[in-house]
Each structure stands twice: as structure tokens, then as C-alpha cells.
Amino acid sequence: MSGYTEGIIILLCINAIAAMGVSVLTGFTGIFSLGHAGYMAVGAYTTAILTVEYGVHYIPAILLGGAMAMVIAYVIGVPTLKLMGDYYAIASIGLGEAIRLILENWQSVTRGARGYPGIEGYTTLYVSLAFFAVMAFGMFNLINSRFGRAFKACRDDYIAASLLGFNTARYRILSLVISAFYCGVAGALLGGFLSFIQPIMFDMIKSTELTSVVVFGGLGSMSGTLLGASIITLVTELFRPISQYRMLIYGAILVLIMVIRPEGIMGQYELGPRLFRRLKDKFSFRNRDNSEGRSS
Amino acid sequence: METLLQQTINGLSLGSVYALIAVGYSLVYSILLFSNFAHGGFLVIGGYICYFTLKSLGFNIWIAGFASLVGAGFSAVLTERLAYKPIRERTNVTLYLLIASMGMSIVIENIFVIVAGGRFRALPPVIPTHPVHIFGLATTSAFDILSLLAAVFFLGALQLFLIKTKWGLAIRAAAYDLRTAGLMGVNVNLLISIVFFVAGFLAAVGGIFLSVRYTLYPQLGMITIKAFVAAVIGGLGSLPGAVVGSLILGLAEMLTAGFISSQLRDLVVFSLLIITLLVRPQGLFGKNISEKV
């Protein structure tokens, strides 16, 4: 396999892990965040500092990077997740930018805006594939578990959910902490892939990209998120020769998706036997399908 | 003492420019209840129209300024027609509008990257920037005073428009309830177009002053994040709140730059945002946001 293909696959895994993290928060719990690149930055810097300065092996370092992102998400989340809707979205911009600015100004630890060079290239093809497989397995189990159903209840109607006895505040924080872990690990893998990280890599544009990948794939569909992340990553690679127009096309796609199919590629469905059964029903009994299906 | 006075004037001047941007953003929010992230794009459009009418067509600042304000206003209307209208006619989920507006902001930014190039441009010296002494107490630039005056003028004009005219009344009614305003016979689509025109118009004023203060480049629109922060501090959807929030933000930024470190000014801005959201999430002048079941 050529180095280029290998690089694309590694990038696909990293983007998919980060997108899964945002998806559990935005798609399943209904909390819209525009600052998740900040958690990627925390993971990336923690792992970089641990491996370079303290000589820690990369696997515990990556996990500690994810754990650090969890801790920060918890500390930030407890007070701010009381906010709802647009208010949390705007607060999360502030939080993400604050993390980036702290990394930029904390010269003695992070080496400031010029970036952190010399990270060991630990993110090989197999490492990234293994991390992706384990984390995807965990995520699909999570969303089908008791917790996943509680997240969806918080998303669909948090008042009804709290009346049914769910501690919605706790589930919202749990969801944020899990998503921060995924983003932290993705950031750590990105650092190992590029061997160099810089605060500006984790700015608001990166956060927007993460959220739009999730929306593009379909809010509330994990396989849609993976599909969306793969399509966006591959399309950006495809347009690399005409890189001038890349961001323009990306923005236009975002607008078009919202205008044409706002529920995303997959809607709320998962890829699997149920989707095919539903599609089959839809095409064989055309007049009966209105009661079900596109009710979101 | 002299630094304090000087930084206060600078802060008020910067805050007044933020106010021009935040008021338009807040106006759109009060009608459609979504954060229009493409607002920064209108500012950039205004700046570039002004730059090219001055440089290539050689007009004076009055014509260039007028063209820039009207051009940005119409591009705001066009943005609404192309991207937001199809969405808001189909659903009332404001999340979709939010994401479409992010897409539009990326589109506008990159149109200018392609057409005008990503480099920094300085506007020709059309606005005087010579130093002015204020009663021998402090020295400031004429530009700061001019931008303060321009902001006061345009905000006053907006206030008159909202209070004295029929469309102003309709906009205030729609800010309470867009649907009911529509049922009372207000042409909602025209009203939304007018609101976007006003928002783009005011953003372009801010854009011209910002491109003199800093320089003009496609990513200048990112500065509207600070205007959003100001609008949230003042209370989303509240126009006096947006103005007061902007002035607080401008002062905080300039005083931090003057007395602590200019690298920390953005951090202070975002800390102010987070403190406001924690202590008083509805902002200084906001309506109570508790939701009804």
C-alpha cells in the first residue's frame, strides 16, 4: 500500500473517531457544540507532552490524553450545560476558543503559537485502525444501551424525560464527557500522525467541520456519522488539486444539504437490516408508508 | 491616568464598531431566533466593495461608502433568499438555519479568497487618522472619534427607523411573535428582507471602520464572534443590550491591552462571555428565557 493511501486511511480513522464523539453529543443528546476542536487540542497536547517530555509509551499517553479531555469537559460542563440551545452553542464557541488561546499563551508548557514539534510518529495504520475499531465497537454498544436510550430521551423531550425520572442534567454531562474522550483520543492520534501540532489547527473552523460532518451524516445516526465523515474526508482529499476552491465547495455543500435534505444522508436510521426492511416496505406498499418513516 | 483616559476612548470607539455589527446580528436573532454566522461575511463584502470602488474606480469615500453599505445590504438579502428562505419555509428547526449560515460564511469568505486573494490590504487613507489632543489630557486619533460619531449616528438612525416608521413597528411586532405579525397582515418575507438589509448595511459600516483600524482580508469576518459575544452579554435579541454589551467588551479589551497584555485581550472577551452565561444567562437586558411546557 502506498504511503498516500495509508495516510488517507489514517486520516479517515481519526476523523471518524472525532465525529463519533461529536455525534453522541449533538446527534443523540441534542446538544449543539461549536467548540469540540478544543477537546481535540487538549488530547493532542497532553499526549505530545507526555510522550516527548516524560517518555511515556504512546498507548497510555493517548488514553491519558482522552482522560484529560474528559476531566476538562467535566469541569466546564457542570456549570455550562445548564444552558440550552443557542446559548450553549455560543458558550461552546467561547470555551473552545478559550482553550486554544490558553494553549497559545502558555509558552512554558505548550511552546505557544509556533506549535509543538518532534512528536514521535506513533499513529501507524494499524494503531489507528485498532483504535477506530475498539472505539466504534464501544460507541455502537453505548448508543444501544440504557445510556443511549437516556441520551435520546434527553434530546427528544428533556422535560418529559426528567418527569419520567431520568436525571437529565447527569446524562447531558455524561454525554459531553464521553464525546470529549473521543475527541481527545482523535486529537492525540492526529498529533502522532503529523508529528507536529499547533493551536491554530484546533480553531473554530475545525469545530464547525466536526459538527457539520455529523449533521451531514444525519443527526441521530451513528452509521450516518461514519458515512458523513468518510465522504467529507474523501471529498476534501479529492479536491486537493484545486485546493483554492476546496473550502468554497465545502461551504456550498453544507448550505445545499440544509436546503435539500436537512435531516442528513441517513436521517435517524442506522445502516442495517432494519433500514433495508423499511426501504423494502416503502417501495412495495407505496400508499402505506406515510404513517411511518419520515416523521422526524 | 493618561493611559486610562486614552484606552477608555479607544475602547469606546472599538466598542461602538462592535455595536454596529452586534445590533444587526441581534436584530436578525430577534426575528428568526437563530445565530446568523454569515453576518461576518456581510462585513467583509462591505469592506471589499469599499476598497475596490476607492482603488479601481477612483471614487471618493462618500460614494464608495454608500456603494459598500447598499451592496452589503443587498448581499445580505440575497443570502437570506438563497440559503435561509427555503429552509425556514419548510421547517421551524432553527438548527438547520444555523448550519446553513455557517456554510454561507465559509462560502463568502472563500469567494473573496479566490477573487481578491488572501493577502492583507490597506484601505487608501480616506479616513483621517492624525492625532487629536483632548483638552491636553489625552491624545487619541481622529479616527477613533470619527468611528464613535459614525456609530452614534447610524445607531440613532436605526432607533428612529424602528420607532417612527410603519416598518419599524412591524419589525418590533415581529420580534415578539413573527407568526402573529404575519397573521395581522405584515408581509413576512418583505419584513425579513428589510431586516437582513439593515443588518448587512450596519455590518458594512463596521466593516469599513474595522478595515481601516486593522487591514482588510477575507477572514476579517471572524471578528464578528466578538460581536456575538457582545450580543449575548447584552441579551440576545435586545438592541440596547447589544450596544451596552459591545461597549463593555470594547472597554474590557482595550483596558486589558493597555494595562495587562495585549495577548490576553481575547481571553478576557471569552471569559466575560462565560461568566455572563453562568451568572445571568439571559444577559443584561434579555427577556427571561425559561421555557414553557
Image (tube, coloured by chain):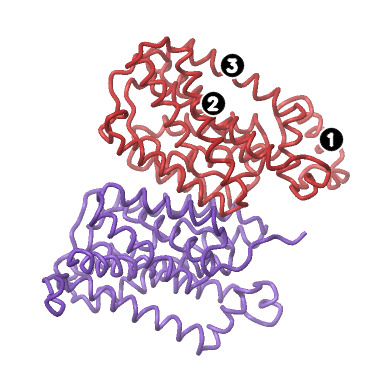
Amino acid at the residue labelled 2: Ile
Q: Which residue is mark 2?
A: A17
Which residue is drawn at the image coordinates 36% and 79% (left, top)? B154
Q: Circle 1: is it few (<14), some (14-19), or many (20+) Cα within 10 Å?
A: few
Q: In the rendered image, what is the letter of the chain coloured purple?
A: B
On the picture, is A78 further left or further right than A246? right
Report the amino acid beneath label 3. Ala
Element carrying mark 3:
helix
Q: Label 1 amino acid?
A: Asp
Q: Position of residue A245 (x, y in %)?
A: 36, 43
Q: Position of residue A69 (x, y in %)?
A: 50, 30
Percent from the top left, x then y, of residue A280?
Answer: 81, 32
B160 sits to left or right of B192: left
Residue A281 badge? 1
Left or right: residue A246 compared with residue A19 = left
Determine which residue is flagged by label 3: A133
Res. A140 mark? none
Q: Compared with residue A189, is residue B109 higher up or lower down, i.e. above or below?
A: below
B236, above or below B151, in the image = above
Judging from the image, what is the letter of the chain drawn in red? A
How many numbered marks does the figure carry?
Answer: 3
Whole-angstrom CA distance, mark 1 to mark 3, is: 32 Å
What residue is at 43 percent from the left and 44 percent from the top? Answer: A249
Distance (Cα) linking label 2 and label 1: 33 Å
Q: Position of residue B277 (x, y in %)?
A: 53, 55
Task: Examine the rendered structure and indicate whether residue B145 appears above or below residue A174.
Answer: below
Front residue of this view, candidates A238 and B30: B30
